[in-house]
Structure formats: C-alpha cells, structure tokens
Image (cartoon, rainbow, N blue to C red):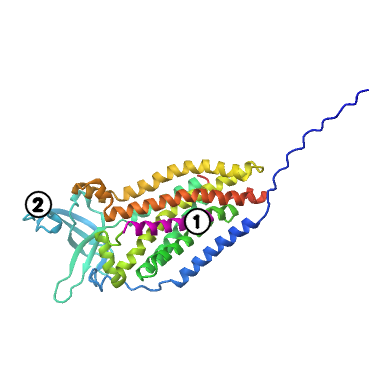
Amino acid sequence: MTATTQTQPPAPRRARRAHGSPAMTVALLVVVGAIVLASALVVALTWPGHVTPSGQAAGLTDAGVQHVKAEVTGARMESCDASVENMLPDGTLPSSVACLEVEARVTSGADEGRVVSVYATSGITAGDVPAGTRIIVEHYPAADGAPETWAWSDFSRGVPLGAFALAFVLVAAVVAGWRGLRAVAGLAVAFTVIWVYLLPALVAGKPALLVGLAASVVIITVALYLAHGPSLRTTTALGGTLAGLFLVAALGVLGAHAAHLSPVASEDDYRLAALLGDHGVQTLHGVFLCGVVLAGLGVLNDVTITQSSAVWELRAADPTASWQSLFTGGMRIGRDHIASTIYTIAFAYAGASLPVLMVLQLYDLPLGQTLTSGIFAQEIVRTLAGSIGLILAIPLTTAIAVTVATRASTRQLTVTGGHTH
C-alpha cells in the first residue's frame, strides 16, 4: 500500500500591518505643529499695529481730496489744450486735442444731487459713458484762494465686480458643494491676512521675507483644513506644502543674489520706495522675495494635496503594497501634474507681463538683452524659483505621504477628506 502525501495549500499571504509604528505620524504632527505655532508667534511679534500712510508727507497724494460717486447725465466732445499724455512719437505736443466733457450728478457725500462737469481721461469716448453710467469723481475743496475743482477719477465698478464675485461663489457651491464654499471661505481668510497683516507689516518695514513666510504658513494652514477637513491626509499635504514653501523661499534668495536683482526696476518701484520713506529701497529687497513665496503658494497647495490624496487612494486600494511600489505609483501621477503645472506658472506670469513685453517689443531690443533686463530678470527668477520648488515638492510630498500612509490605520486610510481634482 502506497502512502500518499497530502499537499498542503499555500498559506495565504499575510497582509502587511496597516498601522505599524506611529513614530513617523507623531514626528509629522510635531514638525508641522511647531512650524505653524512658530509662524503664529512671528505674526504676533511683527504685528504692525496702526500704520500712518506716508503719501501725503511725500507729496504724492492730495490732502482733503474726496472721492465720491456720480451718475453720468450727458457727454460731448470738445477741443482742449494738449498735455503730456498727448505727446506725439517725435516728442512734440499738438496745439489742441479732442477731449470728452462729462456731465454727472453726484450720488454720494455732502454734495449729493449736484451736477458737475469733468473731463474724462484720454482714450474714453462718448460711447463709453452713456447716460446712467456710474463713475467716481474727485472733489478738491477751495483752499488758499483757489476755487473748488471737480475731476474725473474712474468708473465705478462695484456692481459688476460684485456680480462676478457672487457668480464665482455660486458656481463653487453648485459644482463643489460645501467643500467649494469652505474653499471660498479660506480664500477670504487669505486675503484678510494679506490686507490686515502682511501689507501693513511690509509698509512698517518689518523683515519682509520672514513676514511673508509667516503669513503664508498661516494662510495655507487655514485654507487646507477649511477646504479638506482635519485629517492625517490633509496634515501630510500641509507638511509637503511647507517643505515646498521653504524651498521656494531659499531658491528666491539664491536667484536674487546670483542675478544681482535691483529692488527698484520700474516706475512703480520708484514710487513705492518714495512712499515707504528712508527704508524704502531696503524694504523692496524683501518685498520681491515675499512675492516669490506668495506666488508659489497656490500652486504648491494644489500639487501637494493631489499627491497626498493619490498616495492615500493607492494605499487604500492595496493595503499590502510596499513603500517602493506606493512611491512609484504616486510619482507616476506626480509627473503628469508637474508637466501641466509648469505651463500654468509660466503662462500666468507671461499674461501678467504682456504690457511690459509690448513696450520692449516697440523698443526693438535684442531678445537676450530684453530677458536679462531688470524687470524681466525679476519675473524669470520668480518663475524659475516657483517651478523648481514645485517640482521638488512633489517627490517630497509623495515620500512623506507614503511613509505616513503605510503606518496609518484602516480607519485613518478611509476617513473622508483630501482632494478631488
């Protein structure tokens, strides 16, 4: 009788432990928490308080001028003396030019109901200001023997811009639901921080790069948790964003030093330096770096939350996946995102710089000289610092997310939150 050997079925592969060691998770929470607390402390220590505008002291603004709303009642073309803005290409001034006289009824302030006449700025035609058009006019009270004067200021754009803002909120609510509304709330917080803290601190001469980094950390922390909810996944994205933010700041410092960027490269820079007073030029050195950090903030937020969510989903789909396979899968997604986001950054800066590009085109300067001129060198450094920081932030965020996700519990992996592109 022949003995038969019973073949045992292969033991099922044991699933890799879902929670593992919590050391990396704790380390992430400690590091992120420390950075956020330090940034809040910097904001408190550099809070500018009340900043007195220096425009009047510098003679760049007029004391006593009032800006009031008005409604156009009529307009007609007239002949006026030429001014500097009417200078011909050969540098001469014509004897007279056509100008637009606008009659308007004041609708706000102490002179409400009064009809005044003002001359519109060059380029505005009667077709641009039909009866009923809302405008802003300047009122210069009589002083030192001079009579009162009314002047054109601008169009009143509150209603159309308010309508666009409302449409934006409604579209975000309809398409993205409560998450879209929370993202809009985060955007409101961001602009509040910029207006209430960042800009006054820069005007007051606080360390611009430090102020910019602290404000950016506060903004991105509030925005991320508002939009995506408090979760380990969101904290992982925040860690990657902070790492990318400091990379962008360091690259901006290096680029500005290597390219010998001048803080005063345009007429607006000269005007701002004069308004800031004695510390104007020194402040503008840091303002450029502060702008580099802010410019990279939004794109960094997008790519880091996407990478974190991608890794989380890959881990949830295959709890047995190794660190290496998760990282490889996450980077496949990240490389596609890098390619599209680089275009986003470059074309955003190019679109904002079109008027400057046109002026340089008219001067017919060589391309190399154009691209290395002061104002363009700033844009190039800003673009490249943001792009390099963005590219490096993706593998950094992916590595952090993979390390945390492989040690997260099943409940942490399936918790709602994260990012849907």
Is residue 308 left or right of 108 when viewed as pictured? Answer: right
Residue drawn 31% across and 53% down?
A: 377
Please give the label number shown on residue 144: none
Residue sitting at x 59%, y 62%: 30
Nearer to the camera, 307 or 225: 307
Is residue 114 left or right of 279 when viewed as pictured?
left
Instruction: Tell me if residue 326 can be seen.
Output: yes
Mark 2 vs 1, N-terminal side: 2
Would you name the residue on which mark 1 appears?
243
Number of the front mark, 2 or 1: 1
Q: Marks 2 and 1, how far apart in space?
A: 54 Å
What secondary structure is the stretch in magenta mostly built from? helix
Q: Alpha-carbon neighbours of circle 1 within 10 Å: few (<14), some, or many (≥20)?
A: some
- Work out whether residue 169 can be spotted: no
Q: Which quadrant would residue 27 be assigned to in this image?
A: bottom right
The location of residue 38, given as percent across then percent down, is 51, 67
Q: Nearer the viewer, residue 317 or 389?
A: 389
Q: Is residue 171 magenta?
A: no
Using the image, determine if residue 4 lies above or below residue 219.
Answer: above
> Quadrant of the image for the N terminus?
top right
Percent of width and height locating residue 77:
13, 53
Residue that extends furthest to the right in the rendered view of this protein: 1
Horizontally, is 61 left or right of 320 in the view? left
Residue 319 left/right relative to 77: right
Q: Residue at x 62, y 56 (%)?
A: 25
Give the residue type at disc 2. Asp
Q: In the depicted view, which residue is nearer to us: 374 or 301?
A: 374
x and y, in percent, of residue 328 in the image: 56, 42
Start and end of the magenta stretch? 238-260
Dot 1 amino acid type: Ala
Find residue 90 and name its label: 2
Helix, strand or loop status at disc 1:
helix
